[in-house]
Amino acid sequence: MSQPSSRTVPSARPIGIFDSGVGGLTVMKALIERLPTEDMIYLGDTARVPYGNRGPETVRRYATNAAALLRSHDIKALVVACNTASAYALEALRDGLDIPVFGVIAPVARRAAELTETDKIAILGTRGTIQSNSYQRSLLNLRSQIDVYPVACPLLVPLAEEGWTTGSVTEQVIEHYLSPLSGTGVDTMILGCTHYPLMQQTIAEVVERLPFEVVTLVDSARTTSQAVEEALREKSLLSDENAAGVHRFLLTDLPQGFIETAERFFGRSLDGACEHVDITDSTFSLVVPPTG
Ligand code: DGL
């Protein structure tokens, strides 16, 4: 008797994850820790990073291309591991795809609202994420008395992509963005860009140096991976494999910097796991009709 193909066993299909560059790896790492037997395909749109300085239409188009390409790899769920794309494209992707689609903003906002004691929450994000007001809306929907302090930090993504996650230049840039927040009573900071946890240590050190009370940093990785696990379990979409999952990395450009950062971050060689893909290929459509 022939074995069913992976296409006929939805839970055996990979999880798709995308971001503009290295940032979404922070979410993927948390997903791997939580779901070690799941196959995963990561798409880094490295040819078009950063997304954070682009307009809403452009971000939606890029995110749609990325989702369609991943969908053509028969993924069972899509994790939009990018705050900017979650802010501008989540609804369009949910409308256009026939699989569960997870964004990063709602789980993080929920967690931050749980943690704050002063009801004063700072949001650090790309210009796009901040201008979209997505976090601001989510937080105020959760509790209208929350004061939000949005800060666009456009220089942090290029620094993270360059691997400059520590050092005096990065510290100065972070200090420049965070200084205006001291004295506000902010006790919770949302790292509202998946690139920022790569420099979490430096952000924490700068916060420590500035005249803040105790501040808790909340990022997308832990909260989103928990939300993904819970939803996949509920939908009976978790893999029942025992072996470690296979992880592939598709990149729209193949910069050595991405591979070096990813290898440092995961602590293992990604030799043979990274492939170049052409994302602008118009043959991909958002919904792939089921085969067979
Ligand atoms: N890491 C992404 C985010 O969470 C994208 C950053 C960018 O490309 O500007 O917003």
Image (cartoon, helix red, strand yellow):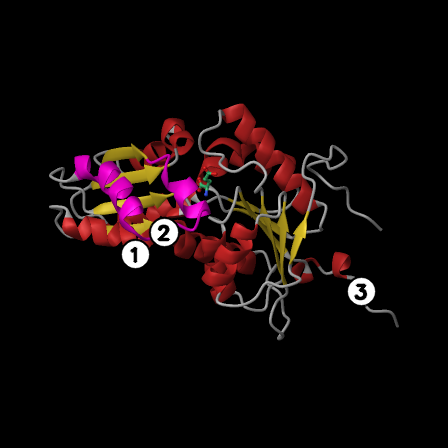
Q: Tell whether label 2 touches label 3 (CB within 8 Å).
A: no
Placement of 22 over or under 143, stated as above or below:
below
Q: Residue at x 55, y 26 (%)?
A: 58
Placement of 158 over or under 242, stated as above or below:
above
In-image side of 74 versus 22 (left or right): right
Viewer-side residue, 135 vs 268: 268
- Kindly identify the amino acid type of the residue bearing the numbered disc 3: Pro
Q: Where is residue 36 drawn, in percent x and y?
A: 54, 68
The residue where tag 3 is placed is: 4
Viewer-side residue, 284 vs 262: 262
- Kindly identify the amino acid type of the residue bearing the numbered disc 2: Thr
Q: CA distance from mark 2 to mark 1?
A: 9 Å
The residue where tag 2 is placed is: 165
Counting the numbered discs, the total is 3
Q: Tell whether label 1 touches label 2 (CB within 8 Å).
A: yes
Ligand 1 image position (quadrant): top left
Quadrant of res 71:
top right
Q: Residue at x 67, y 39 (%)?
A: 279
Magenta residues, start to end: 153-181
Q: Where is residue 125 drawn, in percent x and y?
A: 36, 38
Determine whether the residue tagged by mark 2 lies in a helix, strand or loop.
loop
Q: Where is residue 130 drawn, in percent x and y?
A: 36, 31
The residue where tag 1 is placed is: 201
Q: CA distance from mark 3 to mark 2?
A: 46 Å
- Closer to us: mark 3 or mark 2? 2
Q: Residue at x 21, y 35 (%)?
A: 145
